[in-house]
Image: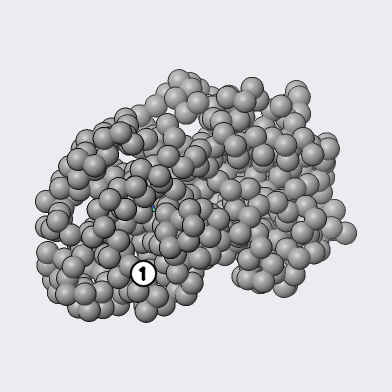
């Protein structure tokens, strides 16, 4: 089967979060099952672009609103990702340093989608499956079925995977001329609550829709940032498929980012060595339990609760633990987290920004990983943490609920709580500190979580079954 993944992110080319990790891994595992999976994404000005070799495979052009755009498709020539990787270059629109966050993101990602469909429409053959990811690619099923220029692609089956339904790509109707001429009778497919809503359009038009965990699919029926009724109506074609983790990239046995590699056989001393390096660097005390947070500092991740939860825990438990935070996001949260450092020297530290290497070092060196998320479609951090023997402290929501069981329950191995409140977080931290004191128990749990199989093999197969259906 030939599968074309279309996405705004793909690790290691450009990544802002879990979407990049998934699109960088799933195709590799699909290829190993004997299929041909390829990835198409925008060409940003990232390090990857300058460090690798590319060849031009297609040049084309299209009109969008009152402009005419030339595009070029380039292919990475060394097969270093484990799948065919194509980048779409649209001069002046996509070739920027950041992935998102520009005022003209609507036109950038609509143009990206038009270029991809235009290119595929010129092929001499048809792919079996076009697999689009999140709202930045979710207009493609509509374009393939209802835009006059591309209707000959209408029999190609499409699938939309929703990694995060909070972001939907809303556009006002005056931007409708970004989309190539379409059958006006079908305008309703583009719309949700008086706006063009690319994610809603993808849910309506794709042959199948998947979310990145079964728990998240359930939650979307009553909390989907305005799309609840649509999920209820389309539930017959929606599936929850848990993400896996790329065990080639996230492997404590040969991770080149970490100080000491370790396995389930020798993790005790070697994990401690990783902790020591981290604590020395951030002026923390390696003898205390180290609790870390890694992620986007936004409301979805309940990052706004971190400053109070960290201060209250340090005060109320007389500094029996240390905290380290890595992330970036809302300026007010970043500011509070930076300010906290001077209050809690030696107990707390933070690094604001995106740092892939440090994230690996933190998964390896920490004792606990905190994820108090209000919304967590799947969550990869908790799975990475477990592979590195770090115990997750998570709120019972979405994919966290599907992947972590409380150690107080039979067969459990994590710390779970119900409410995204400072009180619940502090109580869970209290439980973590008590658990840390039981050395034998904690080593047993570490040994167990390092061996949990969260790899992509199983999920990659489930996607293939979905394509076949
Ligand atoms: P989301 O996609 O909602 O941000 P996920 O848990 O699915 O959350 O994926 C987050 C991914 O992004 C993980 O690989 C995590 O390690 C990484 N990540 C998030 N923030 C940072 C950061 N500041 N520095 C390095 N890696 C980060």
Q: Position of residue 179 (x, y in %)?
A: 70, 53
Residue at (26% x, 65% y) in the render? 433
- Above or below 3: residue 42: below
Q: How is the image coloured?
A: one colour
Quadrant location, the N terminus: top right
392 to the left or right of 76: left
431 to the left or right of 169: left
Picture quadrant where residue 229 is located: bottom right
Residue at (33% x, 36% y) in the render? 264
Please identify the residue farthest to the right as the structure is shown: 185
Residue at (47% x, 37% y) in the render? 246
Kindly tell me whether mark 1's CB lies below 8 Å from ligand 1: no
Picture quadrant where residue 238 is located: bottom right
Comparing 313 with 53, the one in front is: 313
Comparing 103 with 398, the one in front is: 398
Comparing 139 with 255, the one in front is: 255
Q: Position of residue 183 (x, y in %)?
A: 85, 53
Name the residue beneath numbered marker 1: 428
Picture quadrant where residue 235 is located: bottom right
Q: Inspect this view and state whether residue 59 appears.
A: no
Q: Residues within 10 Å of mark 1 (few under 14, many from 20)?
A: many
Please identify the residue farthest to the top as the structure is shown: 78
Q: Position of residue 187 (x, y in %)?
A: 81, 61
Q: SS for tag 1?
A: helix
Quadrant location, the C terminus: top right
């Amino acid at each position: 089967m030939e599968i074309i993944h279309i996405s705004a992110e793909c690790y290691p080319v450009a990544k802002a979060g879990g979407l990049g990790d998934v699109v960088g891994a799933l195709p590799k595992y699909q290829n190993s099952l004997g299929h041909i999976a390829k990835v198409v994404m925008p060409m940003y000005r990232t390090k990857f672009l300058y460090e690798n070799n590319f060849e031009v495979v297609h040049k084309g052009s299209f009109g969008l609103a009152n402009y005419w755009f030339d595009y070029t498709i380039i292919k990475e020539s060394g097969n270093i990702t484990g799948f065919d990787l194509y980048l779409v270059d649209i001069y002046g629109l996509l070739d920027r340093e950041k992935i998102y966050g520009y005022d003209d993101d609507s036109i950038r990602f609509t143009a990206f989608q038009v270029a991809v469909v235009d290119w595929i429409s010129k092929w001499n053959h048809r792919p079996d499956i076009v697999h689009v990811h999140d709202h930045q690619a979710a207009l493609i099923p509509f374009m393939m079925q209802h835009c006059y220029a591309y209707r000959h692609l209408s029999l190609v089956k499409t699938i939309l995977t929703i990694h995060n339904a909070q972001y939907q790509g809303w556009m006002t109707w005056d931007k409708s001329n970004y989309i190539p001429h379409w059958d006006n009778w079908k305008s309703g497919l583009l719309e949700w609550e008086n706006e063009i809503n690319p994610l809603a359009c993808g849910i309506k038009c794709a042959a199948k829709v998947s979310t990145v965990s079964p728990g998240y699919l359930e939650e979307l029926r009553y909390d989907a940032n305005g799309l609840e009724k649509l999920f209820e109506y389309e539930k017959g074609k929606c599936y929850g498929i848990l993400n896996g983790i790329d065990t080639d990239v996230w492997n404590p046995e040969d991770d080149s980012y970490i100080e000491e590699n370790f396995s389930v056989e020798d993790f005790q001393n070697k994990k401690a060595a990783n902790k020591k390096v981290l604590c020395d660097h951030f002026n923390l005390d390696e003898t205390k339990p180290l609790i870390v947070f890694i992620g986007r500092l936004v409301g979805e991740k309940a990052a706004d609760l971190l400053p109070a939860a960290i201060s209250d825990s340090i005060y109320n438990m007389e500094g029996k633990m240390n905290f380290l935070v890595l992330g970036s996001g809302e300026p007010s949260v970043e500011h509070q987290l930076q300010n906290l450092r001077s209050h809690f020297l030696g107990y707390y530290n933070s690094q604001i920004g995106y740092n892939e290497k440090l994230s690996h070092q933190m998964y390896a060196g920490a004792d606990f990983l905190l994820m108090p998320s209000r919304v967590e479609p799947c969550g990869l951090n908790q799975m990475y943490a477990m592979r590195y023997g770090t115990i997750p402290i998570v709120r019972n929501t979405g994919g966290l609920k599907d992947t972590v069981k409380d150690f107080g329950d039979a067969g459990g191995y994590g710390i779970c709580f119900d409410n995204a409140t400072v009180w619940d977080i502090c109580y869970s931290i209290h439980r973590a500190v008590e658990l840390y004191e039981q050395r034998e128990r904690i080593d047993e749990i570490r040994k167990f979580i390092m061996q949990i199989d969260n790899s992509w093999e199983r999920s990659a197969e489930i996607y293939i079954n979905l394509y076949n259906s």
